[in-house]
Amino acid sequence: MTTTFKVSFTLLLLSLFTACSDPNYNGDNYVAFDSMDELSHEVIESIKNNDEKKLLKLLDNNALIFDLLTSAQGEDASKTKAYLMTPEGKRNFSVEQMAQKQRINAFFSAALPSQIKINKAAFRTIGLEFAHEQPYSEGSPALLQSYQIRIDNGEDQTYAYDIQVIYWNQKYHLVEAAGFLNKL
């Protein structure tokens, strides 16, 4: 009798979990984190180690954007989907993605070395500040959130690094990172 109860209870939990997840969420196609602390740690590690490729990998969530548009039911999402299917929309999306990569490259190659004259390896996260939240689009199951990661350089100077994430299916996905550090 207890084995039947355990099996029934397990099936109930699995069905609840399945019912709560979004069928358009394809987690294997995204770079996702269970917590903002984990995501911000990875961002700061990429800065500390001057690892541009790591930050670009964290930002590699193009599939997420398209899956979100597919799952959104609003008029804005429908217009955006139609626009992205046009040659102009595809070109503009590609240009936007290239601009993001160039901005991150400029951050690591020019901005970061000129902003910071000490050993970046001394950086440590001292806080994470939530700034703003809004629905990703009308009828979307996801939220677009803005954060500031607070950083100490080990010599009593603090900085802030702005990022944007999409919170969907109880996961955090990095979609934008600043091209500079804000000195506080």
Image (tube, rainbow, N blue to C red):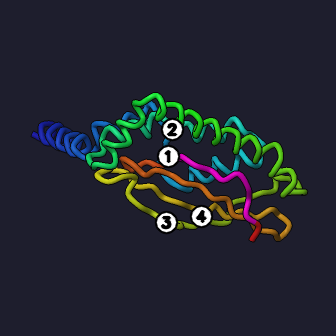
Residue 161 sits in quarter: bottom right
Q: Residue 7, how many percent across, how many down?
A: 17, 37
Q: Residue at x 12, y 37 (%)?
A: 4
Q: Secondary structure at mark 1?
A: strand
**Mark 4 is on which residue type?**
Leu
Disc 3: which residue: 132
Residue closer to the observer: 15 or 29: 29
Q: Seen in the image, is 115 located left or right of residue 24?
A: right
Q: Seen in the image, is 80 located left or right of residue 179?
A: left
Badge 4 or badge 2: first in the primary sequence: 2
Badge 3 or badge 2: first in the primary sequence: 2
Q: CA distance from mark 3 to mark 1?
A: 15 Å
**Residue 46, placed above or below residue 149:** above
Q: CA distance from mark 1 to mark 4?
A: 16 Å
Disc 4: which residue: 128
Q: Which mark is residue 173?
A: 1
Image quarter of the N terminus? top left
What secondary structure characterizes most of the magenta part?
strand
